[in-house]
Image: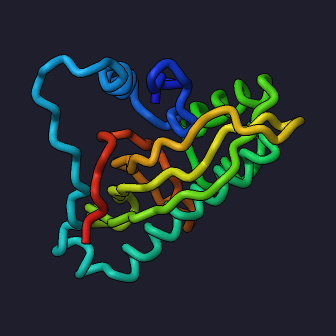
């Protein structure tokens, strides 16, 4: 991922280090007043590919567990803010790991931490035939906030919007890790 911080209505988004550069244009365009243009339909999380997940339900459960473990590591490393927390490397690889670490370093330098919870609704969309790569779609609600580490004062406001993400997972030495996480849109509805 090349984008470090997307701007949402002039304010850095707390989970945006995981969003693609294209999200910046979406977030900025969503900040302007009404232009009379037709509003886009909010994205809906796509249901899992039944032939992939029903034939490999145990593997799909492992993929989802790895995805959830990524967010657990993310939140644990965010308070206190520690870009070098080894849990990040246990659940993230490659450019995505570097992106998260750089974003955390910026927050750490600013004396900030991220606190709160995430309401995840992941579904496995695909698993490759050899069971070493998978795609997860999630329409999650973000209940985290950016806080001043010293005073504990919250520096942002909760958006109340769910975010649709596509997450590529890779199995490495028996552990599912996030290799890329891309924001597909905001205002989604979790798949049933």
Instruction: Please state, as top left, top right, bottom left or bottom right, where the C terminus lies in the image.
Output: bottom left
Could you tell me residue 149's position as x and y percent? 83, 37
* Residue drawn at (38%, 40%) of the image: 182
In the displayed structure image, the side of residue 49 where residue 146 appears, left or right:
right
Give the residue furthest to the left. Answer: 38
Q: Is 118 left or right of 58, judged from the image as shown? A: right
The reply, left or right, for residue 168 in relation to residue 38 is right
Most distant residue in the right direction: 150
Residue nearest the viewer, comparing 98 with 18:
18
Camera-side residue of 168 and 45: 45
Image coordinates for residue 95, horizontal then vertical, percent = 52, 33
User: Quick one: 150 or 185, which is closer to the camera?
Assistant: 150
Q: Decide: is 47 above or below 45.
A: below
Instruction: Tell me if residue 27 comes above or below residue 70 in the rendering.
Output: above
Q: Is residue 16 above or below residue 22?
A: below
Number of numbered discs: 0
Residue 52 at what x, y percent from top left?
Answer: 22, 71
* Residue 8 in which image quadrant: top left
Q: What residue is at 26 percent from the left and 74 percent from the top?
A: 53
Q: Residue at x 54, y 57 (%)?
A: 118
**Could you tell me which residue is drawn at 60 percent across and 48 percent down?**
144
Q: Position of residue 67 (x, y in %)?
A: 49, 61
| Colouring mode (rainbow / by chain / secondary structure / one colour) | rainbow
């Amino acid at each position: 991922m090349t984008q470090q911080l997307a701007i949402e209505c002039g304010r850095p988004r707390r989970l945006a280090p995981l969003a693609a550069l294209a999200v910046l244009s979406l977030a900025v365009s969503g900040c302007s007043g009404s232009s009379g243009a037709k509003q886009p339909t909010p994205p809906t999380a796509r249901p899992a590919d039944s032939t992939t997940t029903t034939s490999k339900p145990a593997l799909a459960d492992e993929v989802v567990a790895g995805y959830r473990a990524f967010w657990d590591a993310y939140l644990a490393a965010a308070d206190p803010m520690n870009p070098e927390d080894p849990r990040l490397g246990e659940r993230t690889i490659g450019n995505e790991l570097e992106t998260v670490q750089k974003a955390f370093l910026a927050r750490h330098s600013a004396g900030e931490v991220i606190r709160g919870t995430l309401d995840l609704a992941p579904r496995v969309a695909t698993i490759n035939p050899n069971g070493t790569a998978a795609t997860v779609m999630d329409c999650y609600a973000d209940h985290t906030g950016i806080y001043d580490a010293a005073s504990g004062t919250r520096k942002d406001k909760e958006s109340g919007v769910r975010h649709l993400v596509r997450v590529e997972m890779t199995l490495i030495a028996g552990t599912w890790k996030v290799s890329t996480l891309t924001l597909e849109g905001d205002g989604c509805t979790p798949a049933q």
